[in-house]
Image: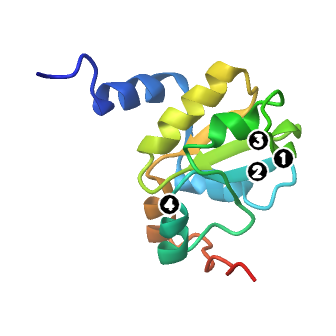
Amino acid sequence: MGLKKGYKALVDEAMAVVRTYSVEEARARLGDPSVQFVDVRDVRELERDGVIPGAVHAPRGMLEFWVDPESPYHRPVFAEDKEFILFCAAGWRSALATKTLQDMGLPKVAHIDGGFTAWKAAGAPVEAKAKKG
């Protein structure tokens, strides 16, 4: 039995309605105080592959709960007046996550085409994930 709508259709629908930055466009915003990069990958991916400097980690499964100020899990970073640029490994999870945040009413949200894999391949800044002390 096939699904009514598979992941490809969901990703395609999201890509049609969200802002997508190339690695070059996103890299130009790195370090801008009005921009916050958001890493939606699993913590094991961060430990294995590294992170974008200054990115906040918000695992995909917790994102909606961290963004909503009414949630007991709300994170104040998401209440700041910033543009949030999401990324995952390849740009699929981040496309879905960006659409969700857009649907929730976050005004300035985008994601990186090709995700962290494309970022790293382009030689953009990467650092090791800091170990929890």
Tell me if 3 is positioned left or right of 33 in this view: left
Q: Label 4: few (<14), some or many (≥20) within 10 Å?
A: many
- Residue occupied by mark 1: 77
- Residue occupied by mark 4: 116
Image quadrant containing the C terminus: bottom right
The answer to which quarter of the image holds residue 11 is: top left
Relative vertical location of residue 80 with respect to residue 1 in this rendering, above or below: below
Q: Label 2: few (<14), some or many (≥20) within 10 Å?
A: many
The local secondary structure at tag 1 comes to: helix
* Comes first in the chain, label 2 or label 4: 2
Distance, label 4 to label 3, CA atoms, is 26 Å
**Percent position (x, y) of residue 43?**
55, 64
Distance, label 1 to label 4, CA atoms, is 21 Å
Q: Which residue type does callout 3 highlight?
A: Tyr
Q: Residue furthest front?
A: 72
Q: Residue furthest left?
A: 1
Distance, label 2 to label 1, CA atoms, is 9 Å
Tell me if 74 is positioned left or right of 96 in this view: right
Asked if labels 1 and 2 touch by Cβ distance under 8 angstroms, the answer is: yes
**Percent position (x, y) of residue 31?**
79, 61
Asked if labels 2 and 3 touch by Cβ distance under 8 angstroms, the answer is: no
Residue name at image x 55 percent, y 45 percent = 60
- Residue occupied by mark 3: 73
Q: Which residue type does callout 4 highlight?
A: Phe
Q: Which residue type does callout 1 highlight?
A: Val
Distance, label 2 to label 4, CA atoms, is 15 Å
